[in-house]
Image (cartoon, rainbow, N blue to C red):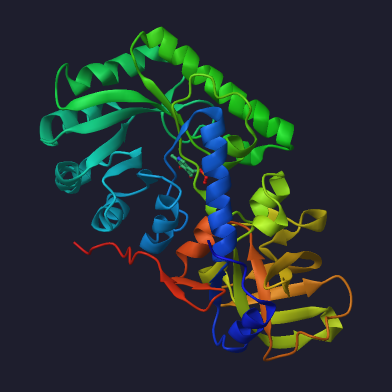
Amino acid sequence: MVSPPHHDSLATLLAGVRRPTLLLDEARARANIRRMAARMREVGVRLRPHFKTHVSATVGEWFRDEGIDGITVTSAEMARYFADAGWRDLTIAIPVNPRQIGELRSLARATELGLLVDDVVTARALARDLGAPARVWLKIDAGYGRAGIPWDAPRRALEVIDELGAGSELEPTGLLAHAGDSYAAASPDDIRAVHARTVERLGRLRGELQRPLQISIGDTPGCTLGEDFDGVDEARPGNFVFHDLMQLELGVCTAEQIAVAVACPVIGRYPARDQLLIHGGAIHFSKDRLAGPDGTDLFGYLARPHEGSFGPPERSVRLTSVSQEHGVLTADGPLPDDLQVGDVALVLPVHSCLTAHQFPGYLTLDGEFVERAPLAEPRV
Ligand code: PLP
């Protein structure tokens, strides 16, 4: 059990910041994991968390502490990293890239591997070339429109299942969807409606296929607020470990549940235009944005240190533009006196998955460095 750090330790930590640094409140992240694990137990669904948000073997152990033993990843390289960290049950939740069947083969031999397929060409290539057992999930588009066999096309689903080959090492395991459309929801009720529609469509397709297929869903908004989990076997949310401004604005988390913030040195001050320049740009935050007041771009909100962690967003001081290394904080009124050049501004990110991806690791509020996977693509 990690107790929240003492206020003074955050001040000491900030005093040592020299460059944009991703801070992680371990107590909040562990509480987020505990909360989601409890919720999934309550609704009777197996939690297979998506590790693409944190991509850290150390943070992975915090999930193990809550009884998690199967995980989701988003690439063969990420699967290899977590397999090397001792995870044996992994699903790579992106349609198989037929050019990587060699990498998948060695993973499938070393682990219990789950793969996604939504095309007969891929199914045929896997059946011919994988040469190792794997669970194969049909990726279903239940309304998001990014990837998958349309939920109302059972014939196409059957064609893919047939290509896997009866009795082969490739086990048609279930129907898997990601309701990314929940992020466009206008209200928590809207999120619940997207979730209910996704579950209903997957259940209907399974009924039409008349096979013993499992159902796997996964998005933080639906898994947090959804009410109907009838017939769902597995959930794969990922973002909830850190949450962020996007989840806050959707009504999915509270400000006290946001577990990461970027500490950015203040490098310019322009009172005439109520703006501060920070060292912290697109290569630290990414360019994911929300709509700020009057539809302006919003890349983050200022937060103050509060009770040893990040306080709630200060909506009057917004990160309004990011270029490569520069960020501009715009205040609604006169600039805060306590943010002078040389001070450090805490900024809450819009999308923690992409922000975390920009950093080599996390600095916990206890001053420990927690590494992320070195996921640089191998060069051909
Ligand atoms: N499953 C798949 C296939 C995804 O693409 C994602 C996220 O993009 C998730 C699960 C996790 O969803 P979230 O980021 O809402 O937690």
Identify which residue, 156 or 37, lies in the foreground.
37
| 168 horizontally vs 141: left or right | left
Residue 292 on image: x %, y %: 76, 57
Q: Residue at x 28, y 29 (%)?
A: 136
Q: Position of residue 359 (x, y in %)?
A: 46, 70
| Residue that lies at the very extreme toward the front in this rendered image | 1
Residue placed most toward the observer, 4 or 45 = 4
The correct choice, above or below, for 313 with respect to 275 in the image is above
Q: Position of residue 254 (x, y in %)?
A: 71, 52
> Dividing the image into 4 quarters, which one contains the C terminus?
bottom left
Q: Is residue 130 above or below residue 5?
A: above
Q: Is residue 139 above or below residue 239?
A: above
User: Left or right of 326: which side holds 294?
Assistant: right
Q: Residue at x 23, y 16 (%)?
A: 162
94 lies left or right of 32: left
Q: Residue at x 67, y 49 (%)?
A: 253
Residue nearest the viewer, comparing 95 with 173: 173
**Residue 240 in view (yes/no):** no
Exactly how many numbered labels are in the figure?
0
